Image (tube, rainbow, N blue to C red):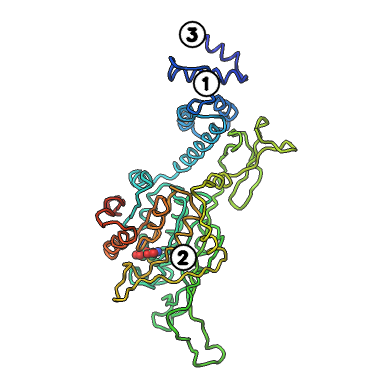
């Protein structure tokens, strides 16, 4: 009987502002019936449900059913009514954020090889850096899709160093291609991969193994092709000017005649590749929070743009057009917080796409390698990448971590820092020493505060 009475009252009030106030009062009464003040007063406070949340669900209902399956939609609705509190603007903001999180979960469900224990270890404690010992391909294959906001790395340069060797250049490029394909899946949408590589002088071992087969190999060009093949977009190529090289040798400088001359190499590439996976998921209008939107244009390759069709939206143009937005603009707006303000000196240093950075000094006066690695990159590369492409607490992954330069730098900048390195036997002790020296921690503290994961224990 009581139930029927409520249903009738509900029907009478439906479509009126009173209806939302009444529902809110009902919700708040069920939380603390003895102390509940009037609904209007409560909706002004920051810790109560705002009636506008009901409005969002009412306008968005049929669209929500298109995006989420029944189970996920029920969970989404329950979580929103349980967690979202505050005034109207804050309600819209929280709803939009929760929606994006759920849309990501829906996307992640499509990949079934993820290892939940591993993902828990990597993502649940963002303040502890993670050093993962093992093959990056193995780890990447067990990571959730679109779970990392930035990748920064410098791969092995084919056979330039003894820590990694391949029979031929093609074997090397095939291995790199498998890894980059997996990186694309794990990288979050509309996010970049900063990739440092040099055009080495070596034998591709395709035709001969003798020194006659040596040539300059344009690894940068080959990698660009591989990245694009897997869906990445080439955006920038910073030329890292390494300054005057140590050798004063001028190849064939003593033969000043045509066709003898070659320059001494003193640059490397620092590529910026972006992932823009065309995502057709409906996204809510950031102004009114409603999902009554039309996707009628693309603001770039792989970037869908939406227009709000809710006539009651709080922002309509003079010609009565709705707010236009994309998942990407929403992401960029969200990152505009004081904590993410980029250092002006850094911006000045990287203003041009030729950047002068001295090579890393790794050998001390006693001839010892103080960094424990033969090919570390300068900390300026991850320092730039982390500040310019991520916000606080976002996840940064280096799949070829070496001496963990990226991981140390992103930890310093309060990001969830993750490094994967294959050669544990070769580098583990040196890496521990480097981390403790750089961060001023005792090795025991490093072992306690960093999360070390062995590849095999996750197989
Ligand atoms: C150029 S170094 C990276 C140096 C690093 N940027 C630093 O600052 O120390 C490349 C690293 O990739 C590692 N490596 C090679 N193949 C790998 C793989 N499949 N998975 C993970 N690491 C790998 C090598 O052992 C090497 O340490």
Q: Residue at image x 41%, y 80%?
A: 208
Q: Are marks 2 and 3 in contact (CB under 8 Å)?
A: no
Q: Residue 283's image quarter?
A: top right
Residue farthest toward the top in the current orientation of the protein: 1
Name the residue tied to disc 2.
Answer: 196
How far is disc 3 from disc 1 in space, using C-alphas? Answer: 18 Å
Q: Is residue 11 left or right of residue 26?
A: right
Q: Position of residue 256 (x, y in %)?
A: 54, 92
For label 2, being within 8 Å of ligand 1 is answered yes
Residue 237 place in picture, x, y as percent? 54, 65
- The x and y percentages for residue 426 are 28, 65
**Of 159 and 168, the residue lying toward us:** 159
Residue labelled with disc 1? 24
- For label 2, the crowd category at 10 Å Cα-Cα, with few meaning under 14, some 14 to 19 and many 20 or more, is many
Front position among marks 1 and 2: 1
| Pointer 3 residue | 2
Query: Of helix, strand and loop, which one carries label 2?
Result: strand
Q: Residues within 10 Å of mark 1 (few under 14, many from 20)?
A: many
Q: Quadrant of ligand 1?
A: bottom left
* Secondary structure category for the residue under label 3: helix
Q: Quadrant of residue 382?
A: bottom left
> Is ligand 1 within 8 Å of the beta carbon of the residue shown at mark 1?
no
Residue at the image position 60 percent from the left and 44 percent from the top: 326
Disc 1 + disc 2, Cβ < 8 Å: no
């Amino acid at each position: 009987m009581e139930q029927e009475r409520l249903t009738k009252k509900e029907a009478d009030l439906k479509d009126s502002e009173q209806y939302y106030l009444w529902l809110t009062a009902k919700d708040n009464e069920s939380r603390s019936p003895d102390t509940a003040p009037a609904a209007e007063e409560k909706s002004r406070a920051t810790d109560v449900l705002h009636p506008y949340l009901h409005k969002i669900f009412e306008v968005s209902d049929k669209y929500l059913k298109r995006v989420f399956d029944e189970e996920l939609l029920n969970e989404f609705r329950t979580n929103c009514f349980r967690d979202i509190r505050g005034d109207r603007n804050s309600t819209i903001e929280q709803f939009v954020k929760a929606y994006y999180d759920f849309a990501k979960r829906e996307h992640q469900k499509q990949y079934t090889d993820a290892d939940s224990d591993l993902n828990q270890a990597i993502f649940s404690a963002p303040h502890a850096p993670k050093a993962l010992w093992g093959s990056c391909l193995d780890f990447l294959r067990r990571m959730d899709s679109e779970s990392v906001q930035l990748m920064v790395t410098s791969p092995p340069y084919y056979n330039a160093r003894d820590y990694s060797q391949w029979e031929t250049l093609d074997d090397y490029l095939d291995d790199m291609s498998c890894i980059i394909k997996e990186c694309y899946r794990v990288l979050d949408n509309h996010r970049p991969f900063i990739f440092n590589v040099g055009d080495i002088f070596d034998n591709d071992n395709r035709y001969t193994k003798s020194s006659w087969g040596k040539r300059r190999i344009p690894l940068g060009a080959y990698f660009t092709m591989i990245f694009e093949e897997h869906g990445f977009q080439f955006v920038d190529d910073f030329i890292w000017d390494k300054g005057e090289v140590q050798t004063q040798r001028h190849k064939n400088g003593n033969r000043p005649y045509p066709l003898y001359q070659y320059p001494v190499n003193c640059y490397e590439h620092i590529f910026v590749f972006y992932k823009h996976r065309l995502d057709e998921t409906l996204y809510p209008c950031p102004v009114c929070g409603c999902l009554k939107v039309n996707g009628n244009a693309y603001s770039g390759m792989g970037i869908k743009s939406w227009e709000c069709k809710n006539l009651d939206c709080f922002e309509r143009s003079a010609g009565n057009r709705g707010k236009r937005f994309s998942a990407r603009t929403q992401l960029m707006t969200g990152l505009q917080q004081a904590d993410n303000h980029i250092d002006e000196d850094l911006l000045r240093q990287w203003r041009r796409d030729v950047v002068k950075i001295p090579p890393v000094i790794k050998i001390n006066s006693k001839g010892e390698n103080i960094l424990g690695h033969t090919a570390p990159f300068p900390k300026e590369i991850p320092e730039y990448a982390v500040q310019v492409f991520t916000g606080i607490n976002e996840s940064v992954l280096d799949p070829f971590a070496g001496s963990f330069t990226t991981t140390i730098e992103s930890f310093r900048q309060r990001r969830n820092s993750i490094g994967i390195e294959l050669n544990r036997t070769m580098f583990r002790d040196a890496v521990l020493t480097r981390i403790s020296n750089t961060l001023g921690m005792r090795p025991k503290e490093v072992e306690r505060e960093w999360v070390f994961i062995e590849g095999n224990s996750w197989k």
